[in-house]
Each structure stands twice: as structure tokens, then as C-alpha cells.
Image (spheres, helix red, strand yellow):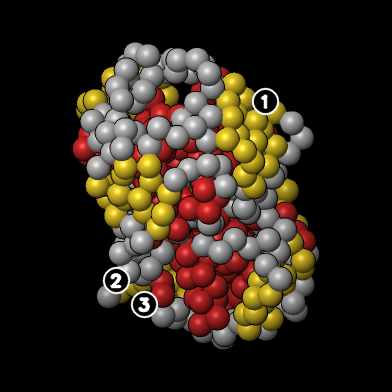
């Protein structure tokens, strides 16, 4: 369904906003719930599209799924080796069920994830990990078929600290015979959250958050009651929206440690960020100073914040440079920002954003959820009104974003 959002510009956001639980934590955690038996409860579930799709996928795998009091409850064990294509194809993160299904059933047939707007999104490192644990991998008719009578612990070196590959291998190794070491593992906070979730079911994972993760396989995993971490990218998006509009916003339910790179770049560009225990206050009164940004795996600057900063830096007092080193095609938002009068030149993975430039509202199109968020930020600062088409992309990862922005004084409607 084509949703559109209309936002009025020249708005200074003011007030308080509460961040929801992390989409990129919950998606692997929901997949990992397939490893458990007994009742697995995950609380503070945000009402976002991606979580709904993965929950339907888990139900299709034979798990009893109930949603009540903002929590998802899982009961029973998987009884399906071939997840339905019409669900799998809707979201790349579906591929995260491969590790748990291989660990639980020794066989899984799963559609190869399609690419998406930001790149081909290969899965070679996921498959390399499964093979290292003793699985045989075959490709047939657009599906990956993985088989292993019993997975056996091993050393896995990741050529690139892939978030998804690290997560999938952790889940496969959790029930393997023996111990697995993942070297050059991703360090993202969502990896730590996944390890804590599996340990809460009786897993034995240590080293998550460092580049060597040790997983001692256990016989079985049981029940749990778990609350995921707050969404650092949603938090960062509201921080940039406050900075871009020259507003003053208190962003609640955050872990400041997870926001270090975002805070550093906002501070460097003349925005004030005050950190407290579990909240940050963001305000800007002076001119935005141009900055250089290079996206990197955590704890480097997050690629999921690149588009939002590009919208913000369009109004800096000089030219900024952004290099996107994580994905090969994550400048889809540039063409849309150019329609609003931004002056951006891209060359390969580098974009030069000329500042001192007031944007003008017009009709634009969201190509992925972070590009959509960037267009919302651009629309909040532009002259006139901006209509964002395909705004359902934004709803994939931002709970109640229209209401949350209205609560900060934005003039915004959804159609
Ligand atoms: C996760 O994607 C996030 N998604 C992405 O967030 C995020 O941008 C990304 O990590 C990087 O932080 C979820 O957690 C659900 P990767 P993932 O594997 O796991 C290459 C958002 O907006 N690669 O770390 O797919 C890959 O091509 C989304 O919330 C291989 O070459 O990211 C890419 O260039 C977008 N082979 C790079 O690694 C592989 O087997 C990073 O990918 C796997 C990945």
C-alpha cells in the first residue's frame, strides 16, 4: 500500500521523545527464540512492520506466537524445515532463521535473500560459517539447502565483521557439539544483546562485543523473559532531527555509550549534546559546521545514520564529505535530496555536500527506511511542505514516527 506523509518545514522540534526497543536487536532475538523450548517472552516489542513479518514467519514454522501487553510470547518447538517464500522474501532478516533451524533440525531450505535498495547483500560469510560447523550447503532453484546431522564447534574467521553473519553463526553454534570461536566478529551492541538473550535461555556465550566470540554448545535451551536494548539508530535519528531544525529535544530511553559516534559528529558540527544516565538532550543555536564522515562497522560511525546526516549537513556553513564504506549503493536518497535543492556531488562511495543551502519542499520518494527518515528530516527544515511517497518504508523501523514527531511540535500528517 502506498503510504505518504506530508511534513511542513521551518519547524524547530522541542520537547521529549521516548525511544523504542531496537529493531536490529529484536529481529535476531526473535530468530534465536527458535532455539529455545518452554516459554520465551520478549517484552517492549515495538509495533513496526519488520517485527510483524518475522513474527508471522516464526508462526509459520510451527511456534505458538501470542502478543499481549507489548510482549511477544513463544511456545513449542519448530516443526517446519522450509519457511514459506512469500514471507521470507518480504524481509532480508528472514535469513537469520537459517542458523537456528540448522541447529534445531539439521536441515533447512530457505530462499536466498534478494538484494535491496542499498546493495546486493551477499550471504557468503553466513554460509562459510555454517560449513565450518560441518553443514553441507547446496543452492537449488533460488533456495539455499543446508544439512548437518550434528553441528560441531570450530574456529570461524570472518573476512568482514558482518553483523548478520556473526548473529547467524552464534545461533547455529549455540546447540553444536563442542566450542566455536568467531574471529573478526562484529562488535555491534545488537550482537551483545543477542548473546545475552541466548544466555538467558541457558546458553554459554562469552566475548560478545569483542572481536572474538566464544560459544560453548549446550544440549538444549529453555525458557526466558527478556527485554531488548533501546534502538540506537532511532535515537540517533531524533538527535539529528533536533540538530537539523535548531531545536531542543530530550531523547529518553537511550544507552549513551551506543551513541558515541553520533554524539561526536553532532558535537563536531556545533550541536550541543548533553548525556545523562539513560537520556540525551540535543540542541543547536549556532551555525552548523561542516564535517567529514566515513561509515564503518561499530564502534565507527553507523551506516544507518549516513542518510540522516546528509540531510542535516545540507545546511552546514560549508562543504562536508561523507564516505559510505559499508554498503556499495547507499546513496539512493541523494537524488531525492537534489529534488529539494540540495547541492550534493557523488563519486563512487563518496559524497560532497555543499552547505549554505536552504532546501525547498516538494514531492519525494522513500527508497529504504533510513533514506525515508532523511527525507523527513529534510522536510522538517525545508521551506514549504514536503510529500514523501512510499513512506511505508519508514514504518519498517520507526514506531509511531508521525505521532512522535507531532509530539515534538512537527506539522506532519499521514495519508
Ligand atoms: C545489519 O545488516 C543491519 N540489519 C543493517 O541495518 C545495518 O546497516 C548493517 O547490519 C550494518 O550495520 C539488521 O540488523 C537487521 P552486514 P546486515 O552483514 O547484517 C557485506 C537498517 O537500516 N557482507 O554487516 O545485512 C555486505 O554486503 C539496516 O536497519 C558480505 O559481503 O549487514 C555489506 O557490504 C540496513 N557477505 C557489509 O558486509 C556476507 O555474508 C555489511 O553487511 C554478509 C555481509
Which one is closest to the eye, mark 2 or mark 1? 1
Residue for point 36% across, 69% down: 89
> Is disc 2's CB within 8 Å of ligand 1?
no
Report the residue marked by disc 2. Answer: 142
Q: Split into 4 quadrants, where in the image is the C terminus? A: bottom left
Residue bearing the label numbered 1 = 274
Q: Is residue 170 above or below residue 145?
A: above
From mark 3 to mark 1, how far is it between C-alphas? 45 Å
Task: Say if 78 sits above or below 370 in the image.
Answer: below
Does 336 sit above or below residue 214? above
Query: Disc number at residue 86?
Result: 3
Q: Find residue 294 and report its horizontal and vertical position in percent.
A: 42, 27
Residue at x 45% of width, y 59% of height: 396
Residue 141 x %, y %: 27, 75
> Distance from label 2 to label 1 (Cα)?
50 Å
In front: mark 3 or mark 1? 1
Q: Position of residue 302 (x, y in %)?
A: 49, 36
Splitting the image into 4 quarters, where does residue 325 fall? Answer: top left
Amino acid at each position: 500500500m502506498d503510504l505518504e506523509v506530508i511534513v511542513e518545514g521551518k519547524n524547530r522540534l522541542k520537547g521529549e521523545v521516548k525511544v523504542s526497543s531496537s529493531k536490529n536487536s529484536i529481529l535476531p532475538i526473535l530468530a534465536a527464540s527458535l532455539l529455545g523450548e518452554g516459554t520465551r517472552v520478549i517484552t517492549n516489542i515495538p509495533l513496526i512492520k519488520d517485527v510483524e513479518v518475522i513474527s508471522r514467519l516464526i508462526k509459520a514454522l510451527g511456534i505458538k506466537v501470542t502478543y499481549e501487553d507489548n510482549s511477544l510470547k513463544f511456545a513449542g518447538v519448530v516443526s517446519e524445515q522450509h519457511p514459506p517464500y512469500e514471507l521470507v522474501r518480504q524481509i532480508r532478516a528472514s535469513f537469520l532463521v537459517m542458523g537456528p533451524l540448522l541447529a534445531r533440525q539439521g536441515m533447512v531450505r530457505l530462499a536466498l535473500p534478494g538484494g535491496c535498495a542499498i546493495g546486493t547483500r551477499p550471504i557468503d560469510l553466513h554460509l562459510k560459517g555454517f560449513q565450518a560447523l560441518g553443514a553441507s550447503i547446496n543452492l537449488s532453484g533460488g533456495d539455499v539447502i543446508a544439512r548437518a546431522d550434528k553441528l560441531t564447534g570450530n574456529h570461524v574467521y570472518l573476512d568482514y565483521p558482518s553483523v548478520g553473519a556473526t548473529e547467524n553463526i552464534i545461533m547455529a553454534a549455540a546447540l553444536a557439539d563442542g566450542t566455536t570461536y568467531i574471529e573478526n566478529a562484529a562488535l555491534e551492541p545488537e550482537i551483545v544483546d543477542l548473546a545475552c538473550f541466548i544466555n538467558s535461555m541457558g546458553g554459554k556465550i562469552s566475548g560478545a562485543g569483542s572481536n572474538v566470540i566464544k560459544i560453548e554448545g549446550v544440549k538444549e535451551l529453555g525458557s526466558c523473559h527478556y527485554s531488548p536494548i533501546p534502538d540506537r539508530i532511532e535515537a540517533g535519528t531524533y538527535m539529528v532531527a533536533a540538530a537539523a531544525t535548531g531545536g531542543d529535544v530530550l531523547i529518553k530511553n537511550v544507552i549513551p555509550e551506543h551513541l558515541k559516534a553520533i554524539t561526536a559528529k553532532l558535537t563536531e558540527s556545533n550541536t550541543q549534546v548533553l548525556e545523562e544516565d539513560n537520556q540525551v538532550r540535543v540542541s543547536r543555536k549556532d551555525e552548523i559546521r561542516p564535517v567529514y564522515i566515513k561509515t564503518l562497522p561499530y564502534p565507527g560511525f553507523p551506516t544507518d545514520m549516513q542518510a540522516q546526516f546528509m540531510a542535516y549537513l545540507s545546511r552546514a556553513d560549508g562543504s562536508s564529505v561523507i564516505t559510505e564504506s559499508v554498503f556499495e549503493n547507499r546513496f539512493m536518497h541523494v537524488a531525492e535530496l537534489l529534488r529539494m535543492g540540495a547541492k550534493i556531488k557523488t563519486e563512487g562511495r563518496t559524497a560532497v555536500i555543499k552547505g549554505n543551502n536552504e532546501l525547498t519542499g516538494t514531492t519525494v520518494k522513500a527508497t529504504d527506511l533510513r533514506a525515508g527518515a532523511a527525507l523527513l528530516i529534510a522536510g522538517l527544515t525545508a521551506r514549504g511542505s514536503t510529500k514523501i511517497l512510499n513512506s511505508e518504508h519508514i514504518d519498517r523501523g520507526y514506531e509511531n514516527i508521525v505521532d512522535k514527531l507531532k509530539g515534538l511540535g512537527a506539522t506532519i500528517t499521514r495519508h
